[in-house]
Amino acid sequence: MPRLDRNGDTSVSIEFEGVAISAFEGDSVAAALLSNGYRNFRDTPVNGASRGAFCMMGVCFDCLVEINGIGNIQACMTEVRAGMHIRRQRGARDIHAQDGSL
Amino acid sequence: MKHPDAIVVGGGLVGAAIAYGLQRTGLSTLMLDEGDVALRASRGNFGLIWVQSKGINFPPYASWTWDSASLWPTLDAELRDLTGDVLDLHQPGGIEFCLSDDEIKKCRGDIRRLHAHAPQVAAEMLDHKALSKMLPGLGPDVVGGRYCRGDGHVNPLSLLRALHKGLLTKGGEIKSGSPVRSIRHQGGVFTVATNTEQHQSARLVLAAGLGTRDLAEMIGLDIPVRPIRGQNLVTEKLQPFLPFPCATIRQTGEGSVQIGASEEDVGFNDATTPRILNKMAARAVTIFPHLKQARIVRVWGALRIMSPDGYPIYAQSQRFPGAFAAVCHSGVTLAAVHTLKLAKAIAEGALPDAVSAMNPERFANAQT
Amino acid sequence: MKPNYDIAVIGAGPAGMAAAATAAGQGATVLLIDEQDTPGGQIYRSLSRQNLKDKAILGPEYYAGHKLIAELETSRVEYCPGTTVWQVSEEREIGISGNGAARLLTADQIIIATGAQERPFPVLGWTLPGVMGAGAAQVLLKTGGVTLPDAVFVGTGPLLYLVAHQYLRAGIPIKAILDTTPQGNTFRALAHLPKALADLPSLIKGRRWISQLRASGIAFIKHVGDVRCVGEDTVEAIEYWQSGQWNRIETQAVFLHQGVVPNVNLAMAAGCEHIWNNAQLCWHAKTDKWSQSSIPGISVTGDGAGINGAKSAEISGRIAALGALHRCDLIDTAARDRLAAPARRALAREVRIRPFLDALFRPSQNFRVPANDQTIVCRCEEVTAGAIREAVDLGCMGPNQLKSFTRCGMGPCQGRMCSLTATEIIAQSRNETVANIGAMRLRPPVKPLLLGELADLAIPPDEPNPKVG
C-alpha cells in the first residue's frame, strides 16, 4: 500500500509469518502489516474466522497477533522494533509457546 | 384466568432448577424473576460441581452433594436433548492445592472426618510429584493437593440459560422484571404481588437467594441468610492446559482461566478490590507460574447466599401448607438434585427426607 | 512518580492536555496519564512527530494542536505516556500499568478525559479483514502516512467526509462513497440551522468537502439503505441497497463510519452515573457545570462527557481543571469563576453547531439495530443479532442478563464494540427506551492487565482514603 511522502523516516526490518518486510520507526505493527498489504491478522478462538485491524486505537481487540512468541498482542497499540517476529494469532493464545519478549 | 400449579420466586440457579423440575413433573409453573440489574449470585459463580469439601461436619449435606454430583450426567443429558445447549460438563475429578504444610494438614484432617461418614467420596492427598504428572506447568511451591474423582465443573451461565429454556420448552412461564412485593395466603391459595401484577397458586417456592429472607417473613418462615462476597477474575482465552477443575482455578470450555474463591463479609457490596484480587492472582501464579503472562479480561464480585452454618436451608411452612423455601450457595453442584429430587418431592407435597436436617429450625435450636 | 497528586488527568487528548496544563498553571501537582507514546489523543495523534511532507493533507485544524502540546510541554505537568489506566475507584485510587508493571496511586481530584471512539457499525461482513473504521483510516494517515487505495467509504458524519477529503487531497484513489445519511435528516436538522448559522465557517467547510468530493468524479452514492461486506478471508466487495436493488462494488478496503460516541468504560467502571443522550444516541457521564460526575472528586470532561468536538473538549478540560483546583482549595471561588468566564463564553460559541450536526448525521435505526439476524453484534464472542433477540425471547431484560445468556460483551473489548448495539436491539425488541433498558455494567480492569502484574502489585499499607474534595 502506498505511503505518503514523509521527511526523514528510518526504516526497520521486521518479519511477518517468516517473510522479511520493511516498516518505519514509529509505525504500529498494524500499520506496518497493512502497508505491506497484509490485512488478515488472525483467526478467532470462537469460530476460527479471519480478522484484521479495525479500530486502530486499541478499542476493538481484533488486530491481535503473536510477537516474538507472545500471543494476543494488539498490533495497533504496539510499535515496531527492528527484528520483530510477528505471526498471525491462530485461535486461542498458547501461553507455553512464548520464547522471547517484546 | 387459570392459575399455575406452582409459582417459583427467583430465577437464579436454585429457582430455575426447581421451576424446571416442577414443570417436568407436570405441574404448570410460573417463575418470577427480577430485572436486568439484581443481586445475582447465579451470574457470578465459579462453576464447580464440588464434593471433596462439602459437609465435612454435616453428613446430610455430604450425601446430598454426592447424590447431586452423581445425578449431574442425567441432568446434563436431559437439558441437552431438550434445549440443544451444551453445558460443558466435565467430571474428571478435582483438585484443591496446598501451598504449605499447614494447608496439607488441614486437607488431610478434612478427608478423615469426611470419610468417617461419607467414604464414597474417596478423596486422597497427592504430593507435588504426583500432581506434577497430572498438571504440566505446576509451580514448585505447590506442596501437594487433595484430589477427589467425584468433582467436576460446568458452564454455570449455560446451565442457567438451559434451565430457563427448558422451563419454557416444557410449557412453563417466566416473568422477568417481576420483583415480588407481597405474598398473601387465603383459602389455600397464595397471592403473589409484583409491582404491576398479581399471581395466584396453591403452591409457592421461594428461591430468591438473598431476597428470600424478606419474602419468607411474609409466610412466617425465618430464613437467616446473609451475603458473603466472592471476587472472581477471568483471563483471555488460552489453549487448553488445565485438564482438572481446581478449587480456585479452572479453565473453561471457551479456554478462559477463571480464578476465584475469595470470601469477605462486606454486606451488600459487590465491588471488586485490588487488595483481594492481588492475593488471588498471587496464589494463582504460584500454582501455575506461566499464568503470569495471561491477560485479565474481566473481574467481578458476587454475593454468596450464606446461612449461619454455611449449609443450605430447605423449609416448608407448617402454617401455610404448600409454601416452601430453598436457599444455598451451591446452586451449580446441587442443580441436579434440585431438579430431579427436590422439585419432585415438592410437587408431591413435602420436602424429601434427605434434606430434613437442613431445616431452618436448626438455627433456632442453636440459639436456645 | 508520587503516591498521591492533587489532580490526576487520564487521557492526553485536547481535554486532558488542557485540563492538566491549566491545573499545573495554578500550582497543583498534576499527573497526566496516557496510553499513547505521544500526546494529542486521536485528533492530534502523532502530531509531535508528524513528518508528512504535504501539510495540506491533514490540514490546519490538525497542526493547530501544536499550540496545546507546547503548552503541555512547557508546563509542570508530570506526563506519563505509554501507560494504561485499568481502574479508578470511588475512593480515587488509580490503577495504572506501564512497562510491564502495575501500580496504585491516589489523587485528590481525578479528571477522566478518555475521549471518543467510533460508533459500532454492525452490518453483515463488518468483521472481515479489510473492513475498518474511517477513523482508523485517519489514524493510519497520521501515523506513517499509510493509505489503502481504492477503498469504499460508507456511512455518515463529518469524520467520514473529512477522511475521504484527506484522501482526495493526498491523491489517493477512492472507489466510492456510499452515503447512509437518512433522507429525512436534512428536514429535521433545519430546526437547528438558525443557531448553527452562527458558526458559518464550519458549515461552509463541511459543504465544501462534500461538494469537492462529488466534483472529483468519485462515485458518491446517496440514500444507501443497507450494506454488506462480502469475501472469504478478507473483504472482496461491498454490496449496497439503493433504489430497490442490491449493487456491488469490488474493493479490498471498506471504511465504515457513523459518528463517534463517548468512551465510557473507565468512568462507568468507576461507578459514575451515566445518562442516555437521545440526540446523540449514546451514554455519557452525568456531570455538573464543573464537569464533576456523580462521584465527588471524579470529573469527566471532553467528548467522554458528550460529543462536542476537539475545540469544545479543550475548553471543557480547562473548566474541569478550574473546578478541580477549587475543590482542592488551590483557587478560591472568585478566581475559579473569573478564570472560567471566558472559557464558558468560548464553549457556548463552540457548541452552537452541535444540535444541527447531531440531527443531520443521526445514523438511521437500521444501521444501529441490524435487521438481519446473521449480523455479528459482539465481535469478540461472535454473538449475532439473532442470538440477542432469542435471548430476549427467553426473558432477558437488559444487557447484563444478555451477557450471561449469550456471552455478548464478555470478550476482551469489554463491550466497547457491542454494548450500544445490543442495548438498542433489546430496547427495540421489548418496545422500550434505551434509557429504561439500561447500560451494560462495567468493572475494572478496563484495560488489559497481566495476571503477573496484578500478583506483583504493591499494595499501599493504608486503604485508599484521600481527603474528600
Image (cartoon, helix red, strand yellow):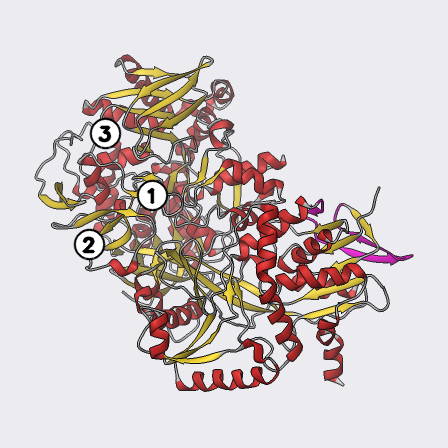
Compared with B203, C119 (above or below) is above
The residue pinned by badge 2 equals A68
Q: Is residue C118 magenta?
A: no
The residue pinned by badge 1 equals A62
Q: Is residue B192 magenta?
A: yes
Classify residue C215 as left or right of residue C363. left
Residue C128 percent location from the top left of the image: 34, 34
- The quarter of the rendered structure image containing the N terminus of chain C is bottom left
Residue B342 percent location from the top left of the image: 71, 63
**The residue under label 3 is which amino acid type?**
Leu
* Residue occupying image coordinates x 18% and y 35%: A35
Query: Which chain does the residue under circle 3 lie in?
Result: C
* Residue occupying image coordinates x 82% and y 61%: B322
Q: Quadrant of residue B180?
A: bottom right
Which label's residue is closer to the chain start, 1 or 2?
A: 1
SS at mark 3 in the image: loop
SS at mark 2 in the image: loop
SS at mark 1 in the image: loop
**The residue under label 1 is which amino acid type?**
Asp
Give how far apart the Cα atoms at labels 1 and 2 are: 19 Å
How packed mark 2 is, by other alpha carbons closer than 10 Å (few <14, some 14-19, many 20 or more), is some
Marker disc for residue C148: 3
